[in-house]
Image (cartoon, rainbow, N blue to C red):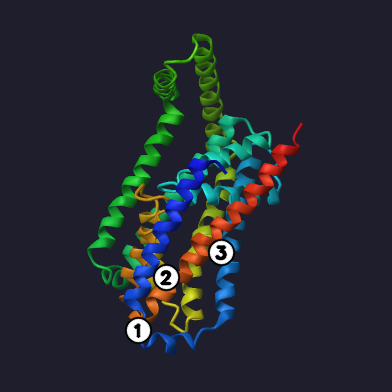
């Protein structure tokens, strides 16, 4: 890992730890020990396994969407790709660092850069559509649970709509006006390579034009001949988010609390949208404060801090461990490559 990446990793973990310590200090009291005596480790283990299952759904999404474009990607390669993406996502705002990692790993699996980019961007589009659908469902069906969270829920609805609208605009430009995308990309490339040799700049611009063309062709396949990839992708996107949301309810049961399935569904939806905003590296601090604030409305203050710590251990710190292990595998693979 490069020194700059280590710096961001330490910053992300440090900020998260500070916030967790403050939350524990403010929530632990004489009743906490009584709640801890009701802990059922089986459900906590099940929560970890469910989170791994979530990653498997993600890997299957990558595999199926790549397969629909004519590229055979093994399941375990896809799973390692997802794990590697977790580390980069944990140290970048809006988890944006994961996208380049997934594109790079697909490229290493002989998927052209444009096609790999199309797969990853379509993943984001499907995530946005799924979250928007879940938000609409929560607003129409889970009215009481939604209103119980106050004004923040309405704000998150608007954020979701903006996110989805942005994805659709980018999708439209990629499909209908690739020439506009090429012009913008070329101008950006020339701006950031002003000190390069002229031949190197032209080579880069040519490569950009070529890959945007590949990307346009791949997206066209998704909307025409590779529609099956989109259907599989959307199915595994739904399974991914449902599994991720259920993990929180399993942790609650493990702590002797009611699962709060409907309430947790709404809270986890809001947190998922909130964590997509470029606020802090890996959304550290933001996720902890948001979860504490909202879950404190439904579970005793004596146990809410413990819940948030375990929730972040499973969905954040566990991700970092998986990402580091996956990165080691990738580094060894690169070292052995001819």
Horizontal side, residue 122 vs residue 271: left or right: right
Name the residue tied to disc 1.
29
Nearer to us in this view, 327 or 106: 327
Q: Which residue is mark 3?
A: 51
Residue 142 visible here? no
Examine the rendering and report whether any part of residue 54 can be seen: yes
The vertical placement of 216 against 256, above or below, is: above
| Pair 3/2: label in front | 2
**Residue at point 57%, 60% (across, down):** 54
Q: CA distance from mark 2 to mark 1?
A: 16 Å
- The quarter of the picture where the N terminus appears is top right
* Earlier residue among tags 3 and 2: 3
Give the residue at mark 2. 308
Residue depicted at 31% across the width and 51% down the height: 159
Quadrant in the picture for residue 22: bottom left
Q: Which quadrant: the C terminus? A: top right
Report the residue that reaches farthest toward the top.
198
**Horizontal and vertical percent position of residue 301:** 33, 80
Q: Is residue 103 left or right of residue 272?
A: right
Q: Position of residue 182 (x, y in %)?
A: 44, 21
Q: Secondary structure at mark 1?
A: loop
Q: What is the CA distance from the residue labelled 3 to the residue labelled 1?
A: 30 Å
* Residue name at image x 51 percent, y 57 percent: 238
In the figure, is residue 240 to the left or right of 27?
Answer: right
Residue 313, how many percent across, how many down? 50, 66
């Amino acid at each position: 890992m490069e020194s700059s990446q280590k710096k961001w990793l330490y910053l992300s973990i440090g900020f998260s730890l500070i916030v967790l310590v403050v939350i524990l200090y403010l929530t632990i009291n004489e009743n906490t020990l009584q709640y801890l005596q009701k802990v059922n480790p089986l459900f906590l283990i099940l929560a970890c396994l469910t989170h791994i299952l979530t990653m498997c759904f993600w890997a299957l999404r990558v595999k199926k969407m790549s397969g629909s474009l004519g590229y055979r990607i093994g399941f375990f390669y896809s799973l390692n790709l997802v794990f590697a993406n977790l580390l980069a996502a944990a140290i970048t705002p809006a988890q944006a660092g994961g996208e380049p990692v997934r594109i790079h790993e697909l490229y290493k699996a002989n998927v052209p850069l444009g096609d790999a980019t199309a797969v990853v961007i379509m993943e984001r589009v499907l995530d946005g559509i799924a979250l928007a659908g879940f938000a609409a469902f929560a607003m129409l069906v889970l009215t009481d649970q939604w209103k119980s969270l106050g004004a923040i829920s309405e704000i998150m609805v608007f954020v979701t709509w903006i996110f989805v609208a942005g994805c659709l605009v980018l999708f439209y430009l990629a499909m209908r006006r690739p020439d506009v995308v090429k012009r913008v990309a070329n101008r950006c490339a020339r701006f950031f390579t002003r000190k390069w040799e002229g031949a190197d700049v032209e080579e880069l611009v040519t490569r950009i034009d070529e890959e945007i063309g590949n990307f346009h062709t791949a997206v066209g396949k998704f909307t025409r001949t590779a529609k099956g990839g989109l259907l599989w992708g959307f199915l595994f996107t739904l399974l991914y988010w449902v599994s991720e949301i259920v993990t929180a309810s399993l942790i609650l049961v493990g702590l002797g609390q009611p699962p709060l399935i409907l309430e947790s569904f709404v809270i986890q939806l809001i947190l998922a949208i909130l964590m997509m905003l470029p606020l802090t590296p890996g959304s550290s601090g933001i996720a902890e404060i948001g979860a504490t604030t909202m879950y404190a409305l439904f579970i005793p203050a004596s146990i809410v801090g413990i819940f948030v710590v375990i929730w972040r251990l499973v969905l954040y710190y566990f991700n970092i461990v998986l990402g580091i292990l996956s990165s080691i595998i990738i580094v060894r693979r690169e070292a052995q490559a001819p």
